[in-house]
Image: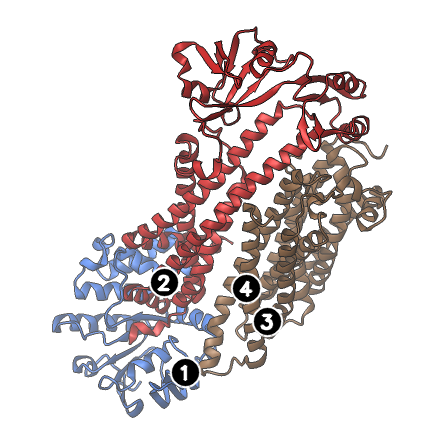
Chain colours: A blue, B brown, C red
Amino acid sequence: MIELKDVSKIYNEGRPNEVRAVTDVTLSIPAGRVTVFKGPSGSGKTTLLTLVGCLARPTEGRILLDGELISSLPERFMTEVRRRTFGFVFQRFNLIRGLSVLENVMIPAYPLGPDYRELKSRAMDLLARLKLDHKAKMKTEYLSGGESQRVAIARALINDPEWIIADEPTANLDSKLALQFLDEVRQLKETGKSIIITSHDDRIVNADVVDMVVEMEDGRIIGIEERNAS
Amino acid sequence: MIFDPPVMALLLASAFSTVIVALGAVFGVHVLLHWNLADGHARQIRMEKRTYLVSTALMLVMVLQLATLVLFVHNADRMAVLFTGAMCAVGTLNVNEYGMPAFLIQVAVFFGAALWLIVNAADNMGRDYPYTRFKYGLLVLLAPLVIAGGVLEWLYFLNLDPNVITSCCSKLFTPENAGIQADLSSADPKLALYALFGGLALLMGLAVWAMRARAGAAAYGIAGSLFFIVAIVAIISAVSSYIYETPNHHCPFCILKPQYGFIGYFLYLPLFLASAIALGIGVLSLWPLPDSLRDRLPMRLHHLVLVSAGLFAIFGAVALYAILASHLIMFG
Amino acid sequence: MRHWLARQRYLVDFTLAALLRRKGRNLMLLFIYTLVIFILASVIFFGSALRHEAKAVLKGAPEVTVQNLVMGRHAMAPPEWVEKLKKVRGARRIEGRLWGYFYDKANGANYTVMVPSRYDRKNALKDGETIIGAGLARVRDVRRIGHLFLLSPKGKLMKLKVKRILPETSELVSADLVLMSRGDFLRFFDLPENGGYTDIAMQVRNRNEVAKIVEKISKMLPTARVITREDVLRTYENVFSWREGVVLAMLSAALVAFAIFAFDKASGLSAEERREIGILKAVGWETSDILAMKLWEGGLVSLFAFIFGVAAAYAHVFLFDAGVLAPVLKGWSVLYPQFSLTPQVDRLQLATLAFVTVIPFTAATLVPIWKAAITDPDVVMR
C-alpha cells in the first residue's frame, strides 16, 4: 500500500517560473489492484505518478510505502527503493535507440551487477511471455508501436517489482493494441502485481479490470471512485 | 627548475588537487551550516546533488595523490644527478628546506583523502547519511593541509638550485649523526624486526577478533595505523640494510631504485594502502554505530579488515623475502 | 566484490556501445585528444632520446678533464703537466689530447678536428689518413671520392685519405668529426711540436674518489680548470630538460585549448543523450551509476587517445626522425646530423605524459559529467 499525506510538489521553486503541480494530495493506493489517475493534461496526474513512483521527491508532505517513510529519503536510497519496487512503462516508451531489444530489457538490472547468463535468461523469458523473443536481437528503432510497448513492459518487469506504473499507455496505440494492453494489465494483476496508470482515455478508465479511479484537476483530487470492492 | 616536464606534471597535479579540495571545503562549510535531510526544498536537494560531485572529485584526488607520491619520489630520484652530493631522492629533497616537508605533507594528504573516502563510502550506505557532518568537517580540516602541500611543492621546485651541495642518504641515515633520520637509523635492528613481525602477528590476531567484535575492529584500526610507523622504522633500521646487503646503508628511498628490482614499491604500496584502510576502520569503529548502518556497516568493516590484513600480509611477505634473499647476515 | 566487478563490466559494455552509437562526435574528440598527446609525446620522447644520446657519448668520455687557464681563458696545457698528473694517486690513463674547431669556408660548417686517443686502437691513424663523421661525409660527398681536401686556416691545402666513416649510431655528436694523426694536426693548425695539449684527460680508478682527486689537482696546478664527467652530464641534463620544458610550456596553450574543447564536448549534451540519461535513471540507475559510466567513458577515450598518440609519437620520433620537431629542440650546427635516435622510452616519461594530458581532460569534463548525471529522472515523463 502506498499512502500520501498532504503531498505537494513545486517545480522551479523560488524562481519566476515556479509551478505548483500537485497540491495537498492525501490518498491511499491499495496493493494488488489497478488504479487509474484520470484527468486532462496539466491536471497534475503525471506529477503525482512521479511522486508515487519515487522519481521525484515531494516538496511538502509525506509518502509511505507499506508503512515506511520514503519521501524524505536521499536520492541514492530513493533509487534503491524505486529499483526494487517499481517498474515503469512510459508514454513514449523511452527505449534506448541503437541498442537491441534484449539489451533494453536488461538495462535496469545493470547497476545490481547480476550474473550475465542468469540475467539474460530472465530477459528472454519475459520476452517470450510477451511474444517478442524472436526479435531479441533487433534494434528498437525498427519496432512497431505495440512491440515497443511490450519491450517497455518487459523492461519494467526485469527486476521483478511489486508495482507497475504506466503513463498514458494507450495514447499512441490504436484500439486493437489498446485492448491488447488491457489484456496484459489483466495478466499482471493476476500474477499479483499492483498497477497504477495515468490516462484520460475512456477505453482504460472504463475497463472492468480497473479497481479505483482517482480524478484530478489543477493539482488536486476532485473525486475517488472505487469499483470491484473486495 | 620549473621548466622540467615531470616537475610541470607534478605542479599541475597539485594545482588540480588544491582547487578541488579548496572548493570542496567551501561546500563543506555550507553542509555544516545548512544540512537537513528532512527538508524537501530546493536548497537541500541541490546540496545533495552536489555531494556526488564532491565525492567523485575527491576520489580522483586520492587516485591522483597516490600517483603523485610515486611520481614525486621517482622524479626526485632521477633529478639526483643534477645536484652535487645527491645520490637518490633524499639528496634531491634536501636541496632546500621545502623538499622534505612537501613530501611528508603529500603522505599526510594521501592518508587524509583515503580516510575521507572510506568514511564517505560508509556514509553513503546509511539512509540518513549519518556521517555527513563529520565527513565535511574532515574535508574542511583537510583543505589547509592540501593547500600547504601545494604551496610547499611550488616553493620546493622554484628554489631548486643546482649549485647547492646537498647531503644524501648515506649522510643523513647514519646512526652516528644527529637528527631524526639518524635516530631512526640507529634504532636497534633486532628490536625493530621483532616489532615488525611481532606487530604483524598481532595485527593478524586482531583481524580475527575484529571479525567477531566491534571492539576488535577498533583495536585493529588503531594498531594498524600505529603499525605504519613501526614498519617505516623497521624498514629504515633493518629491512633496507638487508636489501642493500650492507649494514651501514639505511636509506628508505634507495630501495625504490631499479638496481634493487623496485622492491621498495612492493613494500610501500601495500603498506600505505593497508595502513590507510586501517585508519578508516579505526575511525569508523570508534564512532558509535548509527542505527541506519546497523545492518550494513559491520559487514563493510569485515571486508575492509580482510583487505587491509591481506595487504599487511603482502607487505610482511615482501619484507621477509627481502631479508631471506639477502646475503647479509646481521645476527648470528 | 563479484557484483561490483560485474557492475563495472556492464557499465563498460554499455559505455562502449554508447561511444559507438555517437561515432562522429566521439571520433572528433578522440582525434584531437590523440593529436595533443602525439605532439607532447613527441617533445618528451625526442628530448629524452637526445639526453640519452649525449649520455651514451659521455660514457666513453674521460672521467676528469684538466684544462689550462691563462687570464681566465682556455689555453694550451703545458706538456710537463702530464708528468705531474701521473703522480696523482688513483688516476690512470693520463693523456694529453689535441682537438680544435675548424670553420670550413667551402660550406660554412664547423668541424671538430681531433687526434684520436692513444688507447683507441680502432681509430689509430697514420699521417695522411683520416676518419670522418657521417654528416661531414654527406656534405662533402666523400663516399665516392675517398679523399678529403681541407684548406687549413693558414691557407695550405691538405689531402687526406678517408680510411673510414664513423657509423651513424651516435651521429648527434660525431657528425662533424674529423680525426687525423698528431703530425697532421700540428701541421694543419701550424702548432709547435712541444706546444702542449688542448686538455688533459684521465680516468679514475675508484669513482668515489673523484672529488678527492679533483681537490688534489686543483692544489697542484692552481691555474688548471678541472671538469668532471658528472659536471658535464649535469649540464646536459639541465639544458635538455629546460628546452623540453619550455617547449611544453609553450604547448600548454594548446593544452588549454584542448581542455576547453573537451569541456564544450562534454557539456554540450544533445537532447537525445539527456533523455537517455533520464531513461536510465528512471528505470533504476542511480546518479553514481551514471557518474561511473561517464568516468569510464572519459577513461576509455583517454586510454585510446593515449595509446594511439604515444604509438604515433614513437613512430614519428624514432622511425621518422622527428621531422616536425628537430629544428626546435636540436639547435645544432649547420651540419644537421641525419640521426636515427635510439628508441628510449621510460616510465617516468609516460607518467609525465599521462599527468599533463589526462589531468586537464578530466578536470575539464568533471563538472559537465556531473551535470549530466544529476539529470532528474522525471524529465522522461514531462
Q: What residue is rendered at 84% in x and 46% in y?
A: B187
Mark seen at residue A108: 2
Mark 2 or mark 1, which has the lower sequence index?
Answer: 1
Q: Which residue is mark 4?
A: B19
In this picture, residue B310 sits left or right of residue C344:
right
Mark seen at residue B88: none
Q: Position of residue B207 (x, y in %)?
A: 69, 55
For the residues labelled 4 and 2, the Cα–Cα distance comes to 36 Å
Q: Which residue is mark 3?
A: B136
Q: Amino acid at mark 2?
A: Pro
In this picture, residue A148 sits left or right of residue C301:
left
In this picture, residue C148 sits left or right of residue A123:
right
For the residues labelled 1 and 4, the Cα–Cα distance comes to 35 Å
Q: Position of residue C41 (x, y in %)?
A: 45, 42
User: Is disc 2 on the same chain as disc 4?
Assistant: no
Image: B288 above or below B169? below
For the residues labelled 3 and 2, the Cα–Cα distance comes to 32 Å
Nearer the camera: disc 2 or disc 1 = 1
Image: A131 above or below C70? below
Q: Which residue is mark 1?
A: A58
Q: What residue is rendered at 67% in x and 65% in y?
A: B283
Image: B232 above or below A78? above
Whether residue A112 is visible here, answered yes or no, is no
Nearer the camera: disc 3 or disc 4 = 4
Q: What residue is rendered at 50% in x and 70% in y?
A: B51
